[in-house]
Image: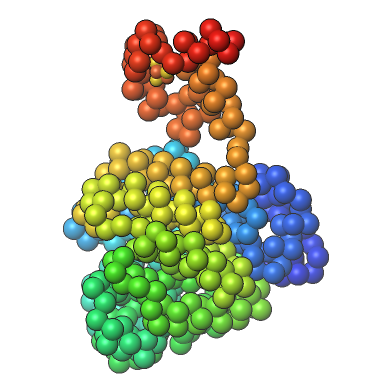
Amino acid sequence: MKTLLEQAREGLITEAMKAVAKSERVSEKFIREGVAEGRIVILQRPGFSPLGIGKGLRTKVNANIGSSSDAVDEEKEIEKARVAEKYGAHTISDLSMGGNLAYLRVKILEATTVPVSSVPIYQALSECRSFEKMSLSKILKVLRRDVYQGISSIVIHPGFTLETLEKVRKRKRIMGIVSKGGSYTAMWMLTHRRENPFLEVFDEILDIAHSRDVVLSLGNTMRSGSVYDELDEPQMDELHMNTELAEKANERGVQVIIEGLGGHIPAGNIAPSVEKFNKITGQRPLYVAGPLPVDVAVGYDHIAACVGGALAAGAGADYLCYITPAEHLNLPTVEQVKEGVLACRIAAHIGDTVKYGLSEADRNIGLHRRKQDWEGQFFHALDGGEKGRQIRGETVMCKMCGRYCALKIMDQYLGG
Ligand code: SF4
């Protein structure tokens, strides 16, 4: 079987490329060239629409859901998956580590139509229960199972070595390493006194990803966990190593997303850092978690991430991972998943207005707002007007300024 990347290189335009071109309103040639050159990836899920992520396409939003070892409510996680898709998440990551993982995965796939991704080392650790007992063959086994189960992309953390870990230790960052998958990978290396497991079997992983044309997402272990932890040598080492691995994967016909720059970054550094990362990676699809431009928004991190995500997307990030109000605090509730998705969609939309210009929806809202046509506004709202209707309630006219409504007063002069 030839992958989309291989077919694109041969000059073929597949049905998936045509579908992505149509939904993104760009030419089929643009998509084919983007895929061939590694600037665009297409996530596929049998029976459902393919999704394009990358340069020249609308910014996409990912929602992380899943149980933890200490919070298991399978039905709630399935509901979160439904809610995330309902409110516009383009992809869902199942990060479950507690309860009946096989049941949860099947149900999450049944409940959704968007591409689903996984981080196989989570499940491997959950099943083995300790780093000592978690063998490399077990990690590979879970990875293979995920790929054959219909997962659209898998996240691995191959971009660092024991030497990188030593550099982190010496730097004495405030927050050390905050990536969950990265920390499990690092602890496996330290426990087994071995180099990065994903580097060791990278060729085998490429063969598995190639067999189902699954997208490989190269994780971001070294991201900062505090705005005071600056873009340092370990982060740059990882970025360079992930770029080399992406080149190797692309040569093998495997599509790659580079995860980078997520975490906590001072606002003024976000845009220049995104530009730097895009340059180093050769404009490969860039996935960013958040980022959070401040650390003080405890309980409101989805709002801080909306600002950071908008700056990142506007500067050229292609794919944002949402942050919920529960970030750093707890497993999010269903309602917090909804809030996180909508905040991230606002960020992506702002980013797209910077990248591609203002949208028709924004113009239409203005036109309806001028006429005080509430339903007209709600129709174009990101959540379909759900929150707007809730806030308005049964009110007939807006009571903000009451009889001194600026719009009405000026209408007498400006005309309706
Ligand atoms: S009352 Fe004030 S806030 Fe409400 S529509 Fe009129 S000008 Fe706008």
| Residue 231 drawn above or below residue 350 | below
Left or right for 331, reference 34: left
Residue toward you, 379 or 91: 379
- Residue at the image point whose x is 76% and y is 51% from the top: 27
- Residue at the image point whose x is 47% and y is 51% from the top: 310
| Residue 215 drawn above or below residue 381 | below
Residue toward you, 80 or 287: 287
Left or right for 249, reference 108: right
- Residue at the image point whose x is 74% and y is 63% from the top: 33
Residue 226 appears anywhere in the view: yes
Residue farthest toward the right in the current orientation of the protein: 11
Picture coordinates of residue 5 (x, y %)? 68, 67
Residue toward you, 416 or 227: 416
Residue farthest toward the front in the current orientation of the protein: 413
Residue toward you, 294 or 176: 294
Picture coordinates of residue 274 (x, y %)? 51, 65
Residue farthest toward the left in the current orientation of the protein: 70
| Residue 342 drawn above or below residue 298 | above
Picture coordinates of residue 153 (x, y %)? 51, 62
